[in-house]
Image (cartoon, helix red, strand yellow):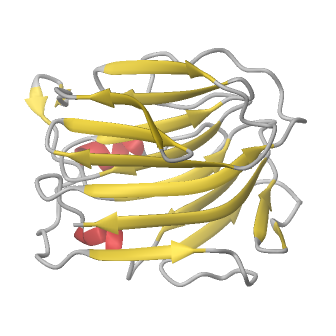
Amino acid sequence: MNITRLGVVLAVALTAAAPAAHAAPASADLDFSAAPPYSGWELRHENPAEPVVKDGVISFDERTQLTIAAGSPWLAVSNERGWAVHAKLRVDPATPDAPACDKDLMGHSGQVGLVATDTAAPTMLGFNKDLVCLKTVDRVINLPMNTTDRAHSYRVEGKGAQLRLLVDGREVSSVQDWTCQLHGEKCEPSPMLMFATGNGARAHLDHLGLTAE
């Protein structure tokens, strides 16, 4: 798969039929206390450098992707019941400067991204060196922030038409009325969850977790 831009699999996710929802909530957490492989996840990279795991942190070079695989609890996610995705990470200072996020759901060079698609629409959390952005199909919110000084905790919660973004335990942004229309029709995507680095971007990931209600 070509992953030189973040979110390249969104087109497939938006057009695929959604699987049947499961009733029981489920969760999964990766603390990177061991090297890959990781159950329920697939790790890919398009550069010679293998991701390095040391002291509970996995370091991603550019064009590296960690995506849910068969057996992931995220495949049971329901937009109606709600979900949460949380990560603790630091963007590497060597990552090049990048423009602010725009309405294009795809990521760009110099950006790290966390893409979460439930049964209604995709949501993307983008990390530049100097900002965090929350993007949906119909809007984009850019929040100035130093993402390179240390590892910060990020959490996105979604339910129905509502989204919340928390940074280090504090709510910094919310959306109450987002919608998803594709070619004039309501979106019905398949569940997908991905953490990835774009061209030139590097990141150090301490933790990645999900709850699929």
**Residue 1 appears in the rendering:** no
Q: Nearer the viewer, residue 167 or 180?
A: 167
Residue drawn at x 40%, y 43% is 10
Residue drawn at x 62%, y 49% is 196
Place of residue 80 in the rendered image (x, y in percent of width and height, measured from the top left): 11, 53
| Up-down relation of residue 38 to residue 145 (above or below) | below
Residue 88 left/right relative to 167 = right
| Up-down relation of residue 60 to residue 52 (above or below) | above
Residue drawn at x 19%, y 31% is 180
Place of residue 35 in the rendered image (x, y in percent of width and height, measured from the top left): 76, 81
Residue 173 left/right relative to 89 = left
Place of residue 2 in the rendered image (x, y in percent of width and height, measured from the top left): 62, 48
Q: Nearer the viewer, residue 3 or 170?
A: 170
| Up-down relation of residue 59 to residue 110 (above or below) | below
Query: Which image quarter holds the N terminus?
Result: bottom right
Place of residue 14 in the rendered image (x, y in percent of width and height, measured from the top left): 27, 43
Residue drawn at x 51%, y 74% is 29
